[in-house]
Amino acid sequence: MCSFFKIIWKIKEIYSISAFTLLK
């Protein structure tokens, strides 16, 4: 279960970074 949350966090992090770069 802990690894599952780590994967979700990584996807969320990558998504936020990509969205931030797209806004620029």
Image (cartoon, rainbow, N blue to C red):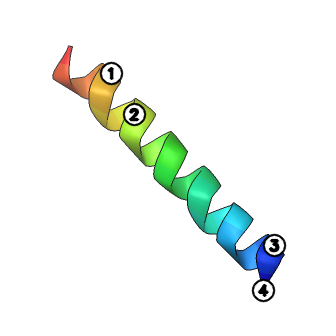
- Residue topped by disc 1: 21
Alpha-carbon span between mark 4 and mark 2: 26 Å
Name which quarter of the figure residue 20 lies in: top left
Q: Is disc 4 in contact with disc 1, using a CB cutoff of under 8 Å?
A: no
Residue at figure coordinates x 59%, y 66% from the top left: 8
Alpha-carbon span between mark 2 and mark 1: 5 Å
Furthest residue in direction front, as rendered: 2
- Residue topped by disc 2: 18
Q: Is disc 2 in contact with disc 1, using a CB cutoff of under 8 Å?
A: yes
SS under mark 3: helix
Q: Which dot marks residue 3?
A: 3
Q: Which dot marks residue 1?
A: 4
Alpha-carbon span between mark 4 and mark 1: 31 Å
Furthest residue in direction top, as rendered: 24
Alpha-carbon span between mark 3 and mark 1: 27 Å
Residue 21 position within the rendered picture, expressed as x and y whole percent measured from the top left = 32, 21
